[in-house]
Amino acid sequence: MIRHHLRGVGLAALACALGLSACATTEPDQGGTAPAKDRSLAAGLDPATRSDPYPSTYQPLPRENFAVVGATVLTGTDRKIENGVVVVTDGKIAAVGDASTPVPAGYRLIEARGRYVTPGIIDVHSHLGVYPSPGVQGMSDGNEATSPNTAQVWAEHSLWPQDPGFNTARAGGVTTLHILPGSANLFGGRGVTIRNTPSITMQGMKFPQAPYTLKMACGENPSRVYGGRNQSPATGMGNMAGYRAAFIAAREYKAKWDKWQADHEGSPPTRNLQNETLAGVLDGSILIQNHCYRADEMALMMDMAKEFGYRITTFHHATEAYKLAPQLAQAGVCAAMWTGWWGFKMEALDAIEENAALVDAAQGSCAVIHSDDAELTQRLNQEAAAALSAGRRAGLNISEEHAISWITSNAAKAIGVADQTGSLEAGKRADVVIWSADPFSIYARADQVFIDGALAFDRTNPAYQPTSDFELGQPGYGLTAANVAEGAR
Amino acid sequence: MRLPHILAAAVAALSVAAPAVAQDTVAITGGRVLTGTSVIERGTVVIRDGKIVSVGTGAAPAGARVIDATGKTVAPGFVAVDSGLAGTEVGSVGGTNELRNASNTLSAAFDISYGLDPWSFTLPVARLGGITRAVVVPQHPGSSGGHVHEDETAGAGDGGYQTPGLFAGQAAVIDLGQDANILVKPRVAMVAPFGEAGADIAGGARGAQFVLFKETLAEVRLYARNKSAYERAGLRDLSLSRADLEALIPVANGSMPLIVTVHRASDIQQVLRLAREEGIKLILDGAEEGWLVAGEIAAAGVPVLLNPISNLPADFEMRAARMENAAALNAAGVVIAIKGNEGSTHRAREARYNAGNAVSHGLPYGAAIAALTVNPAKIFGMAGQFGQIAPGAAADVVVWSGDPLEPLSQPSAVFIDGVEQPLTSRALLLRDRYRQQTPMPPAYRN
């Protein structure tokens, strides 16, 4: 597996390209061989080092080589294989094909006739861990709603790994989650992408080499929160002024650092975490995840991206994306949407069930179904089914093998991990779900969920049904309701 | 535009005394008929004058308009319970919200039926999800849905009474037919939160709420026995307004059910005991931990309105929430009704998916259909009037392309009181406007 070092390519890469000292400090384990430079700063003071101060310690669960045989396989690449074979070697997809696909000797065979296999489900909009269960005061860590620009905060620093919602999401086939700060602020902070495996620490879940993201929010939320405090932004135009001021400041900050890296004249600029994140957006290393409902506002955000020279990776919620489908596709921006949510506020008034299908219909589109919800994330396959159904009702000819991309491969693209997961293709991480039935059926349950080739959930084996620390000894603990001794919660 | 048609239909409906009824006989033939209590393969459902005339395997009556449902599924229209349909348009727009009243001189007396809007755009959307009736309930701080408005203040003045009251007000049954008469029955039940939300109202602790509740019922009974003394100010001061006292008389004498929103198993036990001691008739709402005390709920003969997908310990009242709650309660003999999501208003249409998830977590299929149809009618005292395909019941019938619990199924015909409904909605108008690619701007379409 080629691992692109996505997170560190920003200022550090620029500095390296200029042949400067920062290169020596980007890889601490090479420190012994690099020539010492008088003017280099301590790692914590120099953004060019782009140090990884809270590095992933993720280790896959114990695993074996195996092959799933006999199932209907939806690959996530618009392919449907009846009686298919999926071969997993050392945690990676080794081969996917029809019944003639050879399985190496010694591999465990998982008979899945009558069942379905898909890539692991990816939820690109989750607040698990930052708005965990129980949702009580003391655990509400998702919105640093103290200033319209909190680009300096990182969701990973709020993430509580003991949220029971991680386990229930896994039981719904979710193997990768993108955890975002809330949408109270214009800039809510950095998001973090995680592998959905139980861990005592955030670092133990952190998706190695996944790019950082920045949450931005359009519309009603920031103007309501801050306007309600009689401060800016109180309006849509105030929102725009706030974003633009921040990017102007970030440009200046980046220019100062770029200059100092080039000439080392005078004192280095002071490191500023807020501007550093925004500078990462400007240099393309941090991906914009933009909460934005209305078509007119998405169009403004796309113009603003041109104004300041950055890219929007994904619009979230995007309830009016169908009004702008060709433009989104042309700009290469993903839209992450619900199917059934509408009418809870003005900017959600025009949400329609066909949103994903209409966005998807544009050439070069990237339609994604997301949750933003600890219950819905357990059933993204059903939300995709409802979207598919609405699309067919509208006369669009959409196959299941295509629609599954809305919660797998397109979702991976929307958070910058498509080279690693989101489809059943040789070389990808073996994130695999075996469903009891067609995942577009309401009755389908995830029977087995594999993450990096390791069995992370088994519906019929309690040994593979993790419980969080919080759940131990709580009311109902250890009891099974309705004598249905299967699944999680 | 559809609006003129809607208005014309409304005017036509207003010009007759009763809800509009179809004059012709309709026979829906060849489909898999879910009656609400049984399944008839290749059945025939005959509709006339707004009612189900017959259901069986016979031929369509001569002269009937025949709808061929071969390969399809025919089901009773679903009944949304714990719903806000027709009572709100946009969750965050306070002026559209008729579900909640902050006046504390009118808590129990709050009658939701006056504010329900037949022209609400929430109704056609729900209809496309197979919903034909709804029990619309007042919201309170412990409601499962809607959006709590933090800036709400008392409306009719506080009058020195409890703020807010222990009671949220009275629920109403509506139909979702496209006409001006959606009200089927007002004041079908009283609503009150218990558990944390109820305790907050009483001062913070459950022990206060139960005492306050009993004291309130005692005052209602005192008032009911001494109305003339009350009128001439010959009765001691009471803690509720006259309107609230009056509204609570049917609750106190057990003739009007009290919908109690409650989650924790121990709270359910306490509420069951309270009802026994006070002689009041209960409907439990929520009951996420109900499976822990399913036998007691069944023994008390108390029905439950629940959302089967509530499985997270969202707070300390729901630590035992499980996907199998619906199955466990049903197995214990409790009559259950399955709710939609977020207060069954904009997302009322998801009730069928919730039922499907209950099935995949152990609830028998027939019980899931019943929980959307016959059970709600039974729980609200209207058994036989709607919610089933049986002779004499209102002809609320939906023809589905397949299993109605499957997202991939869609309705192909919806009848309410025997009237075929248009399969459209504001959302579908938006869809069609933007699906077309024409040189003219969207505003020129439709």
Image (cartoon, rainbow, N blue to C red):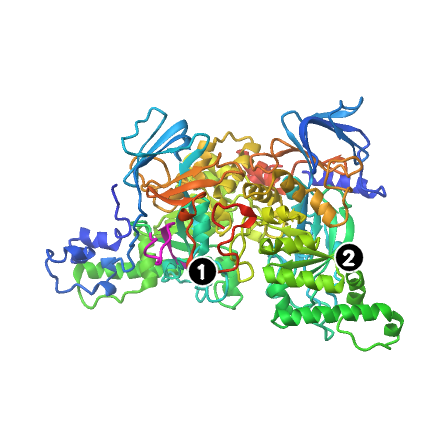
Residue holding disc 1: A470
Of all chains, the one bearing label 2 is B
Q: Amino acid at mark 1?
A: Phe
Mark 2 crowdedness (10 Å alpha carbons): few <14, some 14-19, many ≥20: many
Q: Nearer the viewer, residue A209 or A105?
A: A105
| On-image quarter of the C terminus of chain B | top right
Q: Is residue A329 left or right of residue A67?
A: right
Q: Residue at x 46, y 50 (%)?
A: A168
Chain bearing tag 1 is A
Residue at the location (36% across, 26% down)? A98
Q: CA distance from mark 1 to mark 2?
A: 41 Å
Residue B129 place in picture, x, y as percent: 63, 40
Front residue of A348 and B149 = B149
Looking at the picture, does residue B194 appear above or below residue A12? below
Q: Measured along the vertical axis of the image, is residue B229 above or below residue A436?
A: below
Mark whose residue sits in front, 1 or 2: 1
Amino acid bearing label 2: Met
Q: Which residue is mark 2?
A: B256
Locate residue A84, reporting x and y percent.
Answer: 38, 28
**Are the residues tagged 1 and 2 within 8 Å (C-beta)?**
no
Q: Secondary structure at mark 2?
A: loop
Q: Which residues are magenta?
A: A187-206
The stretch drawn in magenta includes residue B151: no
Q: For residue A431, say whether it is visible.
A: yes
The quarter of the displayed image where residue B156 is located? bottom right
- Badge 1 element: helix
- Examine the image and state in which quarter residue B249 appears: bottom right
Res. B46 in view: no
Residue A400 placement (x, y as % from top left): 47, 32
